[in-house]
Image (tube, rainbow, N blue to C red):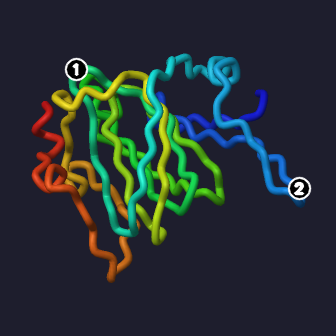
Amino acid sequence: MGQFQFTPLKIEGLFIIEPKCFGDNRGYFLETYNYEDFCKAGIKEVFVQDNQSLSCKGVLRGLHYQKNFPQGKLVRVIKGEVFDVAVDIRKDSKTFGQWHGEILSAENKKQFFIPGGFAHGFLVLSDEAEFVYKCTDFYHPEDQEGIRYNDPDIGIEWPVEAELDIILSEKDKINGGLKSIL
């Protein structure tokens, strides 16, 4: 299909997307999004907002979701490396509470598509990481919720080195567990 390889994951709705990269002695070129190619792969969401963040090693952002205005996200890393995670919080889903994690980096150029109905977060593995993502709905700060990144009911296997200190926002330090959204 076009300029992308779409790999559906075990949890319905999640995809890893690998763009074709064309490089030579000048550098490289790749397409990061094409509505027609994505529709052919079954990703028909319309994106309305783009975001970018810069974080240092050990920063863990998440697990975030919007309760009443769920956002689908197409995420990628343009500098550095992160471990990116999606947790299925669709209450009627047979995979509720299951998670998928993926290394995203500037080097591998992988993208992760996460539909609405998932909590999302990432851990920065490199000294710095620039993270960019498209959203299917606008950000509503009053609607943002979070789940504790280390909730034993989910059991995410974060690739944390022994000497790495996890850096959380004040808000993420007080997130509840998966059971709090039931």
Observer-nearest of 34 and 117: 34
Per the rendering, the mark at residue 24 is 2
Residue farthest bottom in this picture: 163
| 46 to the left or right of 70 | right
Q: In which quarter of the image is residue 125?
A: bottom left
On-image quarter of the C terminus: top left
Q: What residue type is labelled 2?
A: Asp
Residue drawn at the location 33% of the way across and 82% of the way down: 163
In the image, residue 22 above or below residue 119: below
Label 2 vs label 1, nearer the camera = 2
| 150 to the left or right of 113 | left
Q: Position of residue 169 (x, y in %)?
A: 21, 56
Looking at the image, do the residues carrying marks 2 and 1 touch, with CB atoms under 8 Å apart? Answer: no
Asked which secondary structure carries label 2, the reply is strand
Residue located beneath label 1 in the image: 68
Q: Where is residue 123 in the image (x, y as percent from the top left)?
A: 38, 59
In the image, residue 127 above or below residue 23: below
Q: Position of residue 72 (x, y in %)?
A: 42, 28
